Image: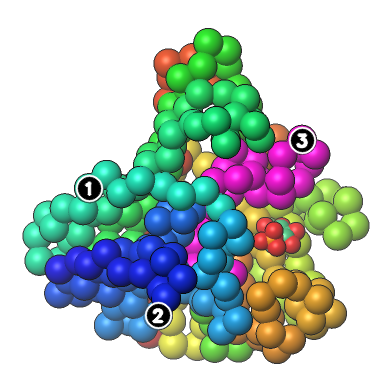
Amino acid sequence: MYTLRSFANGFEYIEVQNSVAHAKIALQGAHIFEYTTEQGALLWLSQTSKFEAGSAIRGGIPICWPRFGNLDKSLPQHGFARIFLFELIKVEELNEDLTQVHLQLKSSSASKKIWNYDFTLDIVFHISETLSISMRTTNESAEEFLLTQAFHTYFQVQNIENITIEGLEGVEFLDTLTGTKKVETQALKIVAETDRVYLSVTKDIYLCEDDREVLIHAENSNSAIVWNPWIEKCSKMSAMQPEAYKEFVCIESANAFDDFKIVKPNESYTMIVEYLTQRN
Ligand code: BG6
């Protein structure tokens, strides 16, 4: 079953309920902000997040597109897709356990003022016991364009100090807080502000807690970002309560920094992510 709903201010989202999962996806940004199965809630959502036109939801999975980060000063941080309204193309209940939701953003005079290219961006969600999302970029311009992008996933955690992130051992990363490159030597624990871009990621990543493990599988993505603002930055961030840093970690599957893509005219590029939760 699915329903198109809206908040009192008209901000629209799709609510999906099938036999194994419950999800909410905003039309603005093709932004999933709730996904719950019998394994519990996967995604963190700020209690003070706004749901209003033109401001990104704080939590869930923001789509960073056509840029990740703020290296390209000609575009807003993390691009503009997260604040643009997508069109709902189709919801298909493929079976009682699986609902597919397809949202699309096409270039418009508003997008061309920010980024002067013709494009179609298709986001397709598979809502089931696992959550999988594909992000397909089609270049409809006469010239090629450069693309960086990410699924900026906020994972809900019981206590940030008790998590371990596995699968990045041996991978080089750029520590954006210091501007230095290092190689990860062991499973990662978050004990301070963390903002790292891992390059040449080829394996699955695991977010581990005492009683839960989330497998993060990405395709056509060779970079991943691990981010937590910790105490000081958290207290200054928009739509975030001061203690919120304890409740989430962002592990973002991306094409970022050296993992940028060039999309030629009439060509498409698709990045996919899948999350599988298991209870111990
Ligand atoms: C992360 C970046 O991806 O997003 C951080 O690595 C940034 O540097 C964070 O602070 C949140 O960004 P925003 O624009 O959603 O506040």
The correct choice, above or below, for 150 with respect to 127 in the image is above
Where residue 272 sits: x, y (%)? 41, 46
Q: Residue furthest left?
A: 95
Name the side, left or right, on which 172 lies relative to 252.
right
Upstream in the sequence, badge 1 or badge 3? 3
Residue 67 lies in magenta, yes or no? yes
Upstream in the sequence, badge 3 or badge 2? 2
Residue 160 lies in magenta, yes or no? no
Nearer the camera: disc 1 or disc 2? 1
- The Cα atoms of the two marked residues, 3 and 2, are separated by 36 Å
The correct choice, above or below, for 246 with respect to 125 in the image is below
Name the side, left or right, on which 252 lies relative to 229.
left
Would you say residue 146 is visible in this rendering?
yes
Label 2: few (<14), some or many (≥20) within 10 Å? Answer: some
Residue at image mark 2: 41
Name the side, left or right, on which 153 lies relative to 130.
right
Quarter containing the C terminus? bottom left
Residue at image mark 3: 74
Toward which corner of the image does residue 167 lie, by quadrant? bottom right
Give, as a single range, the part of the protein colored magenta: 58-82
Label 1: few (<14), some or many (≥20) within 10 Å? Answer: few
Q: Amino acid at mark 2?
A: Ala
Disc on res. 90 = 1
Query: Mostly what secondary structure, the magenta segment?
Result: loop
Q: Amino acid at mark 1?
A: Lys
Q: Residue at x 53, y 10 (%)?
A: 142
Cβ of mark 2 under 8 Å from ligand 1: the answer is no
Q: Amino acid at mark 3?
A: Ser
Where residue 207 sits: x, y (%)? 52, 71
Nearer the camera: disc 3 or disc 2? 3
